[in-house]
Amino acid sequence: MSAPEDGGTGPDRPREAAAFRALLGREIRLALRHPADTLAAVLFFVLVSALFPFGVGPAPETLARLAPGALFAAALLAALLPLDRLFGADAEDGTLDQLLLSGLPRGGIAAAKALGHWITTGLPLLAATPVAAALLNLPVEAWGAALAALALATALLSLLGTVGAALTLGARRGSVLLPLLVLPLAIPAVIFGAAAIEAAAAGLSPAPFLLLLGAGVSLAVPLAPLAAGAALGAE
Amino acid sequence: MGAGLAEAGGAILEARDLACLRGERAVFAGLSLSLAEGTALLLTGANGAGKSTLLRILAGLLRPAEGAVLWRGEDIAADPAAHARRLRYLSHQDALKPALTVTENLAFFARLWGGEVGRALTAVALAPLAELPARVLSSGQKRRLALARLALAPAPLWLLDEPTTGLDAASVERLGPLLAAHRAAGGIVVAATHLPLPLPDAQELRL
């Protein structure tokens, strides 16, 4: 048996990158083993989109008018579903302690979790978007804008949701608190996302709204993992 | 480990005047300890005496209300990542994912720390179960899988919280060579336990 090596000092970037990939790979593998969580979010998205035509009535113009907002509300609520287990499951079985001791900074753990959530929830929701868009009678010209806007909005929700999940970890009724914390912060994403889809449906360019959404995501990419990491460390 | 040999006999892990509060009540206060290379410390005491809490403080997972933990004279709070890299912490919980196989569970930690999964599974006699999902393991087998993390890659500090819970006599005995090799290479063991551990001439701290 070789001698125990001492950890050395300072950050160790290659090892941190390897730990990040290991954690992300594990998140995806776990999601593949438990497809029910992802499936539940996708079915929720499609079913809520299917409820609107029943409530609003079959008039195609009314439905198309509502479609952008309904699509966004359904997708963001669906993406929230798996968030309360994002850190909860790891905290209960002791994995979180091991992650905190993995040598990966806490912000890195949160970033891997956020990216894992987007890959295992955001991407499947995007795949289901054409179905939901058809149910809501969204004009086909606007589908591209809808996909682009939802890709950015779900990424933003994954990042904000990771902060919410870290903050509500260990709180009683955390699963109720989490949407109350996260959804108000997601309002700008709904406004700009729905505006992008409406612009595309009216034959205008959705680019300005998509750029604003992109700006929101670029702001959250560095800040949200830092905030979530700080919340994870606060024991 | 040239630097280690030069300091042989000196204290590597030190705790100075640690105090821990739970609510308003002090769990322990004024606790100091000093451990040299190759030593083992058993933490004993009644339930709620603070054994697990002390291990979490030594791991850097919990900040003490007072005092400091030093590694080679440096406060571990100054560089938590470096401290995390030099320790293995085995908590009450096994930190296993029931949906992953035995090999996959351990492979995640091998990617973090290095080491061979097969060799570590052999060390805890779990090699025949390597491809089974962890959810079908018995509680003792789960504990052995958690212990297999210790056999993956060397680290100078092992913090073990009730390592033998649920283990049969043969498995406890198998832990002996693992602990002995770790100590022979200069490693330190701090273990909280109610049960006898295969740790010859360990110091004991009664909390």
Image: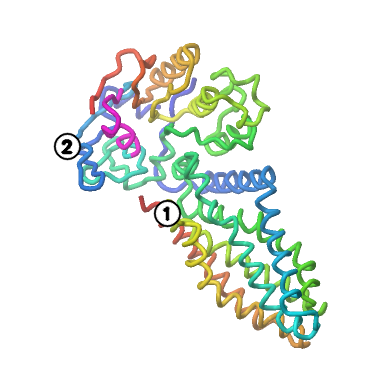
Q: Residue furthest right?
A: A140
Across and down, in percent, residue B130 comes to 65, 25
Above or below, A23 against B96 in this view is: below
Q: Amino acid at mark 1?
A: Arg
Query: Which one is nearer the viewer's eye here, A10 or B56?
Result: B56
In the image, the segment drawn in magenta is: B42-56
Rounded to the nearest angstrom, the CA distance separating label 1 from label 2 is: 34 Å
Name the secondary structure under disc 2.
strand
> Are the residues under badges 1 and 2 in a single subunit?
no
Q: Are the residues flagged by discs 1 and 2 in contact, CB closer than 8 Å? A: no
Membership of B51 in magenta stretch: yes
Q: Residue at x 60, y 80 (%)?
A: A191
Can you give x and y, in whole percent of width and height, for residue B118 in the image? 62, 24
The residue beneath circle 1 is A172
Q: Nearer the viewer, residue B134 or B182?
A: B134
Name the residue located 17 percent from the left edge and 37 percent from the top edge.
Answer: B30
Q: Is residue A58 visible?
A: yes
Callout 1 crowding tier (Cα within 10 Å): few <14, some 14–19, many ≥20:
few
**Foreground tag (1 vs 2):** 1
Q: Chain of mark 1?
A: A
Q: Is residue B205 above or below residue B28?
A: above
Residue under numbered circle 2: B30
